[in-house]
């Protein structure tokens, strides 16, 4: 995080440009590249430069090869997380590259601008990555929706749900994050396939075989280790501050190995609201000082060096933890790292996550905790928005979004206290005659089973391979064959289409069907289209139809390719029959998109015409 803007752009040049050059020195020419975050986006420019210099392609030809073989994953819905640079700083490092590519400086800057003609707009690496990648995705279902809304201006004229940004929900590696003694238990009950067949996700369905008593005793041992570790780290913190022997003696009484343990550990950005639990201090005090059903809290995390709001949240938590009434029940662990994370995700009972929806792109700490049988209490954001159709953990609210942050904090803070008081704490302390919290253990098993199946890195990598890597590899083979003949053909086609596109227009759109139809009838639609010199093979003319909303908009639209049916003067005539298979008002319109067999998808910026 250190340094100024120039240091940052140097880091990103080293990662993107240097990364590709390092691979080249090793004799590796990647067929497909995957950019995680915009930080590596300059690799697309370097790949294009390599094709222009080494294979003697034009910029337009090389762009088609790189676009069709690039995957970009955006990781943040927070605008400040998308790196932007002043044009003068970009010019300092890339003016020569633009000349090598045969681009004017304005055209080079346009690659990183949402509004290419706005000379005052900064150069954004997320925009650059989106423009150079045929495949783009967010890291959860909700984040995909948010990303489509954030970047829809890059594809003017496209409906929001067709903006070409999908989602692949993040996953975590089970055997890295599950505690060793629990791994041993699972190896015994799930069989050798648990280690030898990591992509066999159905193996998680065997979790019901695991003994309730063994699972609970294993978890209790992990909680005991967490408490011992936390006491040791607290002692180290106090020694660094020069604490007296009497102050150090307090460490032995901090936390209980038997109390319900709630953990919150992540980066302390303001939108993550680590202090939401402090919204009603008196109510929190009653939870923490209950001698019959005690609750204890462990916080850990770091703030960005320049994030004053995040630092203030840490200050508030540390101040609260110093209150003599709760000193043995609340702990803030400094210098958060993977070692602390391992103890927390395996030894806590509840994993707390309180982001301000929809600013949490995915979040993976809750997945790591869930794989250890820890139950999540979280706002419906990121991955948890998908997980809550499963019977484990608790949701804070129902996915509402508010314009007033203070109102949102108040409502969700109250909802969090209600959950803890009425559901979480009673369920944890509801013990049978054998001393086991059977309902809680059922939640633990459901948590491990569902997260293991749906949120492991094995599922994630299979999705990336099937949806992006393998199609990208096929595109590379198609475009690069015979001296990049297909890439050259595609670039020539797109140049011709962009030249003619302003003249393409829909001259007539009509239907011979009556205005009132029965279910099962068809709507016969006819259109006359002036293609401005393009052929019917160059474009796809679609009937865009569906049920109408009360505002006259097409809801859940369907796309039906219209067929050419001759010409009338200079216009091509198209026709299609759309099914009227539901009741209610229906509407239709026409749109025109580019069509070429080598295009990964037809949704190209500026190339869509509507009737």
Image: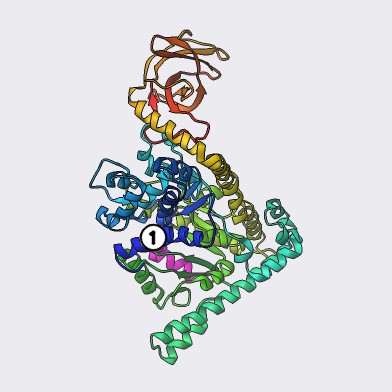
Residue 215: in magenta span:
no
438 vs 119, nearest the viewer: 119
**Which residue shows up at 43% across the image and 56% down it?**
40
Which residue position holds label 1? 12
Q: In the rendered image of this protein, does residue 29 appear above or below residue 502?
A: below
**Which residue shows up at 45% across the image and 41% down it?**
64
Quarter of the C terminus within the rendering: top left
Label 1 sits on a secondary structure element that is helix
Outermost left residue: 120
- Relative image position of residue 74 (x, y in whole percent): 44, 51
**Which residue shows up at 43% across the image and 68% down it?**
301
Q: In the rendered image of this protein, does residue 502 appear above or below residue 372?
A: above
Q: In the rendered image of this protein, does residue 340 appear above or below residue 437?
A: below
Q: In the rendered image of this protein, does residue 331 appear above or below residue 426?
A: below
- Relative image position of residue 482 (x, y in whole percent): 55, 40
478 vs 82, nearest the viewer: 478
Residue 149 is left or right of residue 344, and the answer is left
Give the tally of numbered discs.
1
Q: Which residues are magenta?
A: 269-295
284 vs 507, nearest the viewer: 507
Quarter of the N terminus within the rendering: bottom left
- Relative image position of residue 508 (x, y in whole percent): 38, 13
582 vs 410, nearest the viewer: 582
Crowdedness near tag 1: few (<14), some (14–19) or many (≥20) residues, C-alpha within 10 Å: many
Outermost bottom residue: 245
Residue 286: in magenta span:
yes
- Relative image position of residue 291 (x, y in whole percent): 52, 72
């Amino acid at each position: 995080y250190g340094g100024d803007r120039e240091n940052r752009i140097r880091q990103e040049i080293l990662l993107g440009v240097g990364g590709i050059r390092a691979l080249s020195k090793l004799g590796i020419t990647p067929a497909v590249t995957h950019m995680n975050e915009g930080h590596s986006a300059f690799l697309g420019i370097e790949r294009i430069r390599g094709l222009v210099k080494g294979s003697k392609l034009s910029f337009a030809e090389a762009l088609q090869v790189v676009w069709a073989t690039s995957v970009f994953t955006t990781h943040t819905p927070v605008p400040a997380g998308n790196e932007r640079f002043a044009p003068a700083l970009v010019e300092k490092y890339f003016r020569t590259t633009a000349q090598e590519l045969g681009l004017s400086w304005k055209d080079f800057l346009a690659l990183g601008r949402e509004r290419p003609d706005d000379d005052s707009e900064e150069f954004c690496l997320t925009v650059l990555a989106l423009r150079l990648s045929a495949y783009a995705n967010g890291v959860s279902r909700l984040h995909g929706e948010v990303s489509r809304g954030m970047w829809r201006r890059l594809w003017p004229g496209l409906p929001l749900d067709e903006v070409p940004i999908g989602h692949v929900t993040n996953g975590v590696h089970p055997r890295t994050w599950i505690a060793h003694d629990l791994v041993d238990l699972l190896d015994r009950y799930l069989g050798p396939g648990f280690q030898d067949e990591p992509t066999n996700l159905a193996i998680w369905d065997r979790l019901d075989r695991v003994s309730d008593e063994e699972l609970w005793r294993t978890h209790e041992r992990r909680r005991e280790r967490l408490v011992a570790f936390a006491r040791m780290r607290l002692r180290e913190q106090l020694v660094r501050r020069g604490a007296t022997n009497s102050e150090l003696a307090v460490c032995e009484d901090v936390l209980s190995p038997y109390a319900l343990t709630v953990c919150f550990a992540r980066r302390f950005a303001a939108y993550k609201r680590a202090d939401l639990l402090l919204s009603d201090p008196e109510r929190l005090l009653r939870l923490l000082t209950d001698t019959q059903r005690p609750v204890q809290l462990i916080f850990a995390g770091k703030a960005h060096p320049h994030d004053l709001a995040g630092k203030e949240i840490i200050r508030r938590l540390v101040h609260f933890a110093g209150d003599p009434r709760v000193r043995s029940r609340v702990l803030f662990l400094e210098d958060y790292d993977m070692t602390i994370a391992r103890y927390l995700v395996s030894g806590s009972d509840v994993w707390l996550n309180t982001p301000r929806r929809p600013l949490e792109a995915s979040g993976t700490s809750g997945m790591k905790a869930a794989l250890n049988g820890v139950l999540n209490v979280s706002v419906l954001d990121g991955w948890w928005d998908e997980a809550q159709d499963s019977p484990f953990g608790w949701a804070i609210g129902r996915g509402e979004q508010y314009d007033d942050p203070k109102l949102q904090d108040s409502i969700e803070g109250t909802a969090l206290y209600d959950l803890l008081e009425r559901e979480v704490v009673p369920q944890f302390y509801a013990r049978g005659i054998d001393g086991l919290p059977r309902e809680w253990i059922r939640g633990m098993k459901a948590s491990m089973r569902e997260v293991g199946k749906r949120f492991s890195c094995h599922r994630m990598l299979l999705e990336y391979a099937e949806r992006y890597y393998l199609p990208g590899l096929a595109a590379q083979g198609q475009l690069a064959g015979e001296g990049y003949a297909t890439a050259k053909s595609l670039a020539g086609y797109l140049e011709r289409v962009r030249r003619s596109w302003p003249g393409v227009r829909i001259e007539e759109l009509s239907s011979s069907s009556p205005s009132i139809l029965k279910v099962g009838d068809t709507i016969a639609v006819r259109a006359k289209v002036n293609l401005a010199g393009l052929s019917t093979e160059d474009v796809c003319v679609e009937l865009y139809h569906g049920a109408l909303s009360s505002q006259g908009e097409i809801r859940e639209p369907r796309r039906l390719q219209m067929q050419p049916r001759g010409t009338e003067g200079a216009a091509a005539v198209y026709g299609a029959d759309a099914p009227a298979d539901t009741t209610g008002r229906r509407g239709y319109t026409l749109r025109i998109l580019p069509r070429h067999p080598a295009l990964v998808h037809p949704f190209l910026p500026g190339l869509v015409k509507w009737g």
